[in-house]
Image: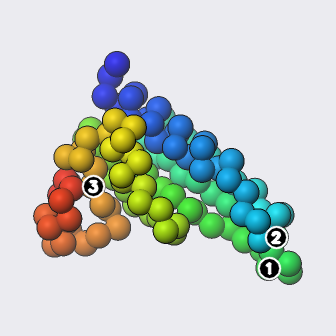
Amino acid sequence: MDKIKKYQDILIGYLEEYAKIKPANQPDIESFVIADRENNHFQLLQLGWQGKQYIFTVVFHFDIKDGKVWFQRNITERDVVDVLMEKGILREDIVLGFRSPQVRPYTGFASA
């Protein structure tokens, strides 16, 4: 299997699994997986109402650039990269995009 397709499948599968989790304190919040395979952008959105407050949140965002998975956003407490590596994404193919370029060489993951 082509590495890019494999990584796309892993990311989409992870987002779909997470989207099934319904927060107990937010019954009116829906989760949506946004997957753009052609341009390699993948997100999990949550939107809806929490009381009188409208919620629109990007929970996770990943990109695939130059054969590497760029982990751009995570607003959860989950160790997502551990799960992604268990599913088959190589450590050296993960870039922590939310870390500054100066810090990335010290993260134990790809710099870019």
CB atoms of marks 3 and 2 within 8 Å: no
The C terminus: image quadrant: bottom left
Q: CA distance from mark 1 to mark 2?
A: 6 Å
Measured Cα–Cα span from mark 3 to mark 2:
33 Å
Q: Amino acid at mark 3?
A: Val
Measured as percent of width and height from the top left, residue 5 is found at: 40, 28
How would you rate the neighbour count of disc 1 (Cα within 10 Å): few for under 14, some for 14-19, many for 20 or more? few
- Which sits earlier in the primary sequence, circle 3 or circle 1? 1
- Considering depth in this image, is 39 or 53 the residue closer to the camera? 53
Mark 3–mark 1 CB contact (< 8 Å): no
Residue wearing tag 2 = 49
Q: Hey, what amino acid is under mark 1?
A: Gln
Give the residue at mark 1: 53
**Callout 2: SS:** strand
Horizontal side of residue 85 vs 16, given as left or right: left
Q: Residue at x 49, y 68 (%)?
A: 77
Can you tell which mark lies on residue 17? none
The structure residue drawn at horizontal position 32% and vertical position 22%, both measured from the top left corner, is 2
Residue density around tag 3, few if under 14, some if 14–19, many if 20 or more, within 10 Å: many
- Percent x, y of residue 87: 39, 37
Q: Quadrant of the N terminus?
A: top left
Residue at the image position 68 percent from the left and 47 percent from the top:
20
Q: Position of residue 28 (x, y in %)?
A: 83, 64
Q: Position of residue 106 (x, y in %)?
A: 14, 67
Residue type, numbered disc 2: Trp
Left or right of 17 in this view: 31: right
Of the image marks 3 and 2, the number of the one nearer the N terminus: 2
* C-beta proximity under 8 Å, tags 1 and 2: yes
Which residue is label 3 attached to? 95
Instruction: Find numbered disc 1 in the image and state the secondary structure of the residue it sits on.
Output: strand
Q: Judging from the image, what secondary structure is the residue with disc 3 in?
A: strand
